Amino acid sequence: MWSLIKLSRIYDAPVKYSITLQNIPSDKVLIKSVDTTITLIMRARGLELYSLMFNPSKNKVNVDLSGMRLRREGDNFYGYIRSSRLLKDISEQIPQENSLLSIEPDTLRFVFEQEYRRRVPVSVDLKLSFSDQFQLYDSIKVSPDSVTVFGTKSILDTTYFIKTEHQTVRNLKENKLLTLKLHKPKTKPALVISTDTVIAEVKIERFTEAEIEVPVSNSNKDGINFRTFPDKVKLTCRVAMKEYDRLDPSLFSVTINADEAAVSDNNFTEIVVTRQPSFVRVIKIKPEKVEFLILK
């Protein structure tokens, strides 16, 4: 009974509130706020004050910086607001049954730098696995492939790309459109990014292996003529099923490894593929080495 009587009475007491800044001056970045919390001297019933004092995580108010004048010193801009100017605005943000008497400290001070912007590419952090016979058909397309970042000059000078948050996708066997969140670098002051997400287009196709016989070129880039034994090699290629009918020996060029041939003491050298279509991947050459004879 004694507690209930005490808590039902009216008291004046200080309560701490964290502040959220609104209407920061345009083209400026807040680099320092002397005060991130303020103390409100409030008149309220004891029970209400008790709740406010012992549950501070919910005590938040907005502070409007519009109309604040800035003074420049070197690369920094300084501004301040008298707490008395905030009384009416903050009074409207606290419960109506409570009265706001005053705010401490009497002045809020802020330091800003000029805001810069820069366009940087997006780097995708994806781990993909595929169902049997399926593979990535084309490079992953990202939209947008670059974003605008806003911040201080020193931070932007060391920001070369923005990564997506890591994502794993398993057993792929069809095309996918993935929404990827952007990973915001931990900088102080915080970096602002023009968008929170990007779309990644992942194209998947069924692949198969195919063998194709290709003649070995009888000359190299230095104009040296030679003969090889054998004069043809078999290429084992991985190709999408829908591209299988496009395979043709004329799309490939193979020759000997000229650098290796120049120092070879047994007239054997590796075969290298110098031209191939973009829709195939050569995974094996048979034979890998051939005997050669330089023609004079």
Image (tube, rainbow, N blue to C red):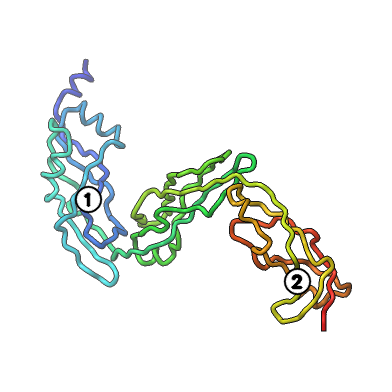
Work out whether mark 1 precedes mark 2 in sequence or the reverse, and give the earlier one. 1
Question: Looking at the picture, how far across and down is residue 43, in whole percent?
Answer: 14, 34
Identify the element where label 1 is drawn: strand
- Reading the image, the residue beneath label 1 is 22
- Reading the image, the residue beneath label 2 is 257
Give the residue type at disc 2. Answer: Asn
Give the vertical position of 294 relative to 244 (above or below).
below
* Quarter assignment of residue 10: top left
Mark 1 nearby-residue class (10 Å; few <14, some 14–19, many ≥20): few
Q: Residue furthest right?
A: 266
Q: CA distance from mark 1 to mark 2?
A: 67 Å
Give the residue at x 63% y 51%: 244
Comparing 87 with 118, the one in front is 118
Q: Is residue 218 left or right of residue 82?
A: right
Identify the element where label 2 is drawn: loop
Q: Residue furthest bottom?
A: 296
Comparing 14 with 255, the one in front is 255
Mark 2 nearby-residue class (10 Å; few <14, some 14–19, many ≥20): some
* Quarter assignment of residue 39: top left
Q: Quadrant of the C terminus?
A: bottom right
Question: Looking at the picture, how far across and down is residue 265, in whole percent?
Answer: 88, 75
Give the residue at x 80% y 76%: 226
Discs 1/2, front = 2
Give the residue at x 13% y 44%: 89
* Quarter assignment of residue 280: bottom right
Question: Looking at the picture, how far across and down is residue 115, in whole percent?
Answer: 30, 63
Give the vertical position of 76 relative to 238 (above or below).
below
